[in-house]
Image: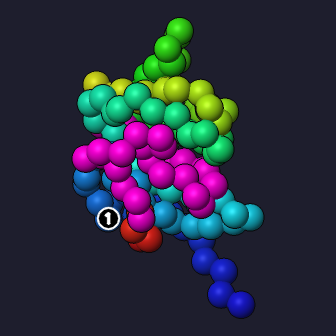
Amino acid sequence: MNINKINLDEKFKKFSNHWDPKIIGALNGQHVKLVKFKGSFVWHQHDNEDEMFLVVHGSFTLHFRDSSVELREGEFIIVPHGVEHRPEAAEEVQVLLIEPMSTINTGNVKGTMTVETPEWI
């Protein structure tokens, strides 16, 4: 059995693209992903998947149609399936995501920001 630790700083240094999630692990039908945000993402929802956003470095605002939540380093939020949302970051933020393997980053919206098959790093 080969069980290795994962260093988040080392993994984040492997990529610079924004809104392009990278898979760093898998467990119980879930992917653990890293992503860097800057600017605004698209409004979207995930009809069947909940998502967890954990801020590793920086901060961002998660907008909902009726409110917004500011998230800072060390904070996380779980967005239930079916809830429309849009992440936005004034400065680059580093985020760890935990979500079902079937989750596509833009959910029910397909476009230029859609990543159908995230890269493993």
Dividing the picture into quadrants, the one containing residue 77 is top right
Residue 14, position in %: x, y? 32, 64
64 left or right of 118 in image: right
The residue drawn where x is 59% and y is 27% is 83
Q: Is residue 59 above or below residue 109?
A: above
43 left or right of 69 in image: left
Q: What span is in magenta?
A: 91-117
106 left or right of 51 in image: left
Q: Is residue 68 above or below residue 82?
A: above
Residue 42, position in %: x, y? 35, 32
The residue drawn where x is 65% and y is 36% is 81
The quadrant of the rendering that contains the C terminus is bottom left
Give the amino acid at mark 1: Lys
Of residues 100 and 110, the one drawn nearer to the viewer in this rendering = 110
How are the residues colored? Answer: rainbow
Of residues 26 and 8, the one drawn nearer to the viewer in this rendering = 26
Question: Can residue 49 be seen at all in this image of the molecule?
Answer: yes
Secondary structure at numbered mark 1? loop
Asked whether residue 120 is drawn in magenta, I would say no
Q: Most extreme residue toward the top, as rendered?
A: 66
The residue drawn where x is 49% and y is 14% is 65
Residue 104, position in %: x, y? 48, 52
Of residues 79 and 48, the one drawn nearer to the viewer in this rendering = 48
Q: Quickly name the residue at label 1.
A: 14
Q: Is residue 54 above or below residue 29?
A: above
